[in-house]
Amino acid sequence: MAKQSVDRTPAGQAIEDLIIEIVATFFLLRAEGMRIGVVSSSGEGYWSVLRLLKVNGAQTVPQIARYRYVPRQSVQKLANEMLKDGVIEFVNNPAHRRSKLMRLTPKGETVFAELSDRIALLSETLAAQKNVDQLQDAVDIVKQLHQQLRDMLNQ
């Protein structure tokens, strides 16, 4: 495959720099998430799956995998861990006989609240002396990139 030369623009370079920083920050956040218990020991987003179930209701393993753009097997492995922990349960899916729905248990609701408090504390610590308008601008830009990438992947 021939190497294609790209005419670099300041905006393109800024996006590249942003991607590099997001990726580097992701790994630091995952390490901190493991330390505070919101990420599983295998690096999977324990809290984020609880959040998806809390916000969107019961879902199948394949639905969560598609939403997160990860292999179904990694979500299944995490679901098995969460089932063992008693934070989710599998229930019959009226839309599909073989693909059960995952839903939060009462213990899952409690664990979700506890983990959310840990994330809130981390967020408040990181927010100290930051400009709220700049933070909101950063959120807006990352959301736009998120949607743009989703659109590209779904073409």
Image (cartoon, helix red, strand yellow):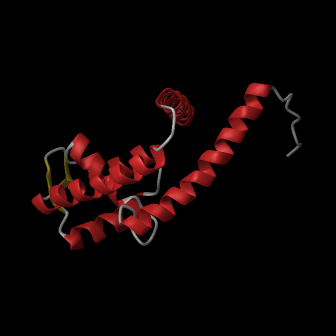
- Quadrant for residue 7, please give it: top right
Q: Is residue 9 above or below residue 21?
A: above
Q: Position of residue 76 (x, y in %)?
A: 34, 63
**Is residue 14 shown left or right of residue 94?**
right
Give coordinates of residue 139: x percent, y percent. Answer: 49, 33
Q: Confirm whether residue 132 shows in the render.
A: yes
Q: Is residue 100 left or right of residue 47?
A: left
- Total of numbered circles in the picture? 0
Which residue occupies 43% across, 67% down?
Answer: 34
Residue under the point 89% across and 35% down: 5
Q: Is residue 100 visible?
A: no
Q: As drawn, which residue projects farthest toward the front?
A: 129
- Residue 111 % position (x, y): 21, 61
The reply, left or right, for residue 55 in relation to residue 127 is left
Q: Position of residue 11 (x, y in %)?
A: 73, 26
Determine whether, in the image, residue 106 is placed left or right of residue 23.
Answer: left
Name the quarter where the C terminus is drawn.
top right
